[in-house]
Amino acid sequence: MASLNMFGFVALWSPFFFMSLLVITWLYFMMVGPWRSRFTNEGPATRKQKAFFVVGIVLLYICKGSPIDLLGHLTFTAHMIQMAVLNLVIPQLFILGIPNWMFERMFRIKALKRTVMFFTKPLVSLILFNALFSFYHVPFIFDIVKTNVLLHAAVTTIIFFAALMMWWPLVNKLPDWPTITGIKKVGYIFADGILITPACALIIFANDPLYATYYDPQAWMKSLELCVPAGTLASLDLTGPQMFMSMSILHDQQLGGVLMKIIQEIVYGAMLFFIFIEWYKKEREKETIDATISPQPSE
């Protein structure tokens, strides 16, 4: 297998993206710290909220700024791991990491609030995310998106927005915000898992490679232009994606589909566990309150 070092430091570590995330992180800590009193009288963000946000930023850099992003253009397996973490893990961390008062400030913009309220309706958010994810992985759409830098940036950003909307009904903590609770959350997660299955099944059970950007040298080279500087790419002697694979293209594709499904099942399974814990705590609190206010039998 060829070494990734041939692509150079910029392609491997995306320093400009790294600096952008550092600025965003600095702004976040200033907003929830020294600048907070300018916007709200509420207390500072909790350690848990700060940890959620920082972990989200770190994972975002790993997915879109580290060698994982380059690997996502070299092997389909890396691409699917990248998509799973980017859309199933990071959105939850950002929603949980941003204090309620920041969301409330943003939602003072009525157009933004109406947009979010519409796209976070359970049926809308479920269909939107899973439809976008599935259509993106239709072979001819995927190959077009993967070979156009502006289209790729737009489509991946839209899917990420849809992922935020999909997770919002499950994890947001805003009081008085329309959301789902209890058994409805369980049904929501099961529906989510069912809707994403056809796309994974298409990839796993295909008998031939589906995506030209992973088997056709010309399409593959075009896709590399999205993350490798043109000067560096022109100086390299590349023959095709097989240079960086230890398995066949078909097996790489199938493994990517399997890992996507496994990661999805782990994430959704963890969410079901937390929903059960939350339900159990509420039931115990309800029992305690009922026992406190109920009249004691006279002796």
Image: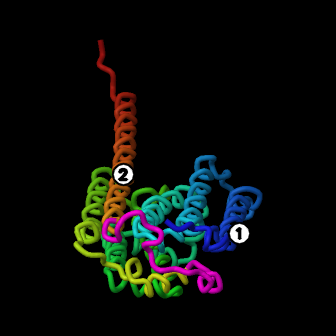
Distance between mark 1 and mark 2 Cα atoms: 32 Å
Q: Where is residue 158 shown, x and y percent of the image?
A: 46, 78
Q: Which residue lies under the disc numbered 1?
A: 19
Instruction: Return the x and y of residue 34 as percentages of the image width and height.
Output: 77, 57
**Quick check: 31 left or right of 168?**
right
Q: Is residue 73 above or below residue 68?
A: below
**Is 17 located above or below residue 226 in the figure?**
above
Q: Secondary structure at mark 1?
A: helix
Residue at 57 percent across and 78 percent down: it is 227
User: Which residue is pictured at 34% across the width and 76% down the height?
Assistant: 137
Query: In the drawing, does residue 69 fall left or right of residue 33?
Result: left
* Nearer to the camera, 96 or 57: 57
Q: As rendered, which of 283 and 5 lies closer to the eye?
A: 5
The residue that disc 2 covers is 266
Q: Quadrant of residue 286?
A: top left
Q: Amino acid at mark 2?
A: Ile
List x then y, in percent, for residue 29: 70, 58
* Position in image of residue 2 (x %, y %): 53, 68
Whichever of callouts 1 and 2 sits on the residue coming sooner in the sequence is 1
Q: Specify the label residue 146 is tagged with.
A: none
Give me the residue at 60% from left, 86% from top: 234
Q: Which residues are magenta?
A: 227-251
Is 236 included in the stretch rendered in magenta?
Answer: yes
Left or right, 110 with respect to 217, comes to right
Q: Tell me the kind of residue under disc 1.
A: Met
Residue 62 painted magenta: no
Give the SS element for disc 2: helix
Can residue 144 be seen? yes
The image quadrant of residue 240 is bottom left
- Against 55, residue 82 (above or below) is below
Q: Tag 1: Cα neighbours inside 10 Å, few (<14), some, or many (≥20)?
A: few
Relative to 254, 45 lies left or right? right
